[in-house]
Amino acid sequence: MPDTLSRRLADLEGAEAALVLASGMAATTCSILALLRPGDHLLASSRIRQSTRLLLQQELPALGVALSFIDPRDTRGWRRGLERTTRVLLMETPSMEDAQPVDCKPPRMLARELGIALLVDSTAASPVLFRPLEHGADVVIHDAAFLLDGAGGNAVGVVCGSEGVIEEVRAKMLTWGAVPHPAALAQLDRELDTLEVRVLRQSATTSTVAGWATTQAAVSRVDVPAGADPDGHQAGSTTMVLTLDSVARATRCLDVLIGREATPTSAWRGTHATYAVRAEEASAIRLHIGLESPALLTERLAEALA
């Protein structure tokens, strides 16, 4: 099973090899440990998940690795942020913070020019919507609980890349005790059977709900990719950010949406059901669209926005 699953994941991303680890954070951590050494510098996009940001800020200094952040919306920021010891560029696309794709071209060109690694977290896209290796990435990371494993509750992570890099990541996985449980591997293998169907359905629903949201007086802005960008993202997304007319309304909206859940809202609920979290801006909420019908979702949102 492990070899078959790894081959399947590698084929989905167009990679030489792939590896499943015990969690999404394990995938990120072991990839970074495999690519960096004491004295190196990592240059990261500022548009990354808070959990990844905390990992970088809290753990890299103890390992003797320097860290800088740049805003990827400033395409020249990547070059300005370089240091003599930069060995890895890290980005996330689409950004989990604002649902927008991040242009791979500037970091890709720098990575090729300088012979350094480009590491891309593609959790929010899945290989159905975007394959970073085809656009210059060296390593791709997925938190499988978000899209790859539609059932949720399976917190494994995936790393895809060259055979050499994957062997380095495997060594770190064994050293740091990040080996996944066999049952988690079997579940992920089953869930991959429906990956394309699920993600395309979620993407279509996201587009429908986003269109509805633009007609609501309480919604001042809707952030969702409107179409394929120049670097190859498909015209699709499973995430949107709604900026509302007040912080109070955003709070009430979250209370209503979360109140419908049988369990506290979290990223581990998988893709079968939509969930909402507070976005970076206090008056905004981030919606991760599940497999419900658009009519049901707009009905619930209308109630939440009232």
Image: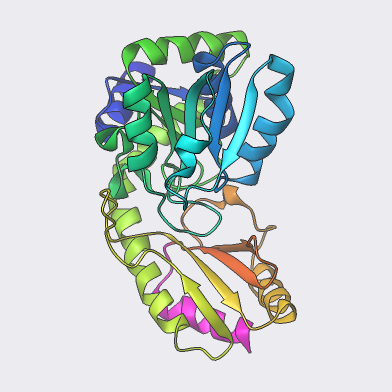
Residue 15 is one of the magenta-drawn residues: no
The colour mode here is rainbow
Q: Which residues are magenta?
A: 291-306
Rendered position, 145 above or below 28: below
State the residue in front, 250 or 107. 107
State the residue in front, 50 or 44. 44
Quadrant holding the N terminus: top left
Name the residue located 53 percent from the left edge and 65 percent from the top edge: 287
Can see residue 180?
A: no
State the residue in front, 48 or 267. 48
Can see residue 190?
A: yes
Return the x and y of residue 74 as percentages of the image width and height.
47, 51
Return the x and y of residue 229 as percentages of the image width and height.
29, 56
Q: Main secondary structure of the magenta part?
A: helix
Rendered position, 278 above or below 72: below
Name the residue located 29 percent from the left edge and 22 percent from the top edge: 7
